[in-house]
Image (cartoon, helix red, strand yellow):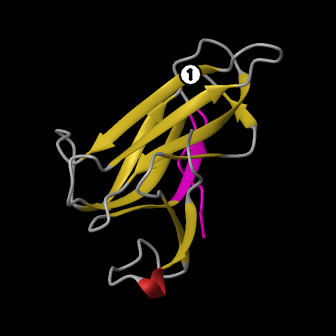
Amino acid sequence: GYSSWHLGDYHSLAIDTIDPDSKTFIAPNETSSCVSSFVFRMMPGGVIEVNVFMKSASNLDYIIVLAKKFVPSRDDTVAGFQLYYATNDNFVEGWNKLKVTITDLSIFDGYITLLGSTAEDSIVLIDSFSYTPPNSADTCEIY
């Protein structure tokens, strides 16, 4: 099974926040951790953006972002995903923005699931996420 992510405070870390108004983050544990968002409407071509920080000391550090389609009375399905770890071609030590494009062909109620793990000497955290519908300007103010 999975453990839950824990809530942390930037005062406990020696890193700059992605935004001065951001005070807290979520971080996985050393065992595989899982947390999901509230349900909201998603559309084909919509984009989920997740602000992540990773300073990796282990090949076992990772974050997986899943866009999930809620399917009543059945298993929910994956409508987009992003896998991020230190040996990825797009890995950047420090802050990065992970983007997941919704690939489902219909409008649906869905949610975001975050999976992750971190070694004791690593820093792996998520500051925030946003969803932008297709053909919309990215005017979402997170803070």
Determine which residue is flagged by label 1. 78
Describe residue 84's horizontal placement relative to residue 126 as left or right: left
Seen in the picture, residue 124 relative to 115 is either above or below; the reply is below
Q: Is residue 48 above or below residue 78?
A: below
| Marker count (numbered) | 1
At x 30% / y 50%, what residue is drawn? 61
Magenta segment, prevailing SS (helix, strand or loop): loop
The spot of residue 45 in percent (x, y) is: 53, 25
Seen as rendered, the residue at the extreme right is 73
Q: Is residue 69 magenta?
A: no
Query: Which residue lies at the image location 55% right of the left edge and 74% below the top edge?
Result: 24
Give the x, y percent position of residue 102: 53, 26
Q: Nearer the viewer, residue 120 or 108?
A: 120
Is 28 on the left-hand or right-hand side of 44? left
| Residue found 55% across the figure and 80% down from its top | 23
Image coordinates for residue 41, horizontal then vertical, percent: 74, 33
Q: Where is residue 110, by image quadrant?
A: top right
Asked which quadrant contains residue 14, the reply is bottom left
Check the picture and name the quadrant holding the C terminus: bottom right
Looking at the rendered structure, the kind of residue marked 1 is Val
User: Which residues, given as a range, are shown in magenta?
Assistant: 128-143
Q: Local crowd at mark 1 within 10 Å, few (<14), some, or many (≥20)?
A: some
Question: In the picture shown, does residue 31 fall above or below 44?
Answer: below
Q: Which residue is depicted at the point 53% across and 49% down?
A: 138
Q: Which quadrant: the N terminus?
A: top right
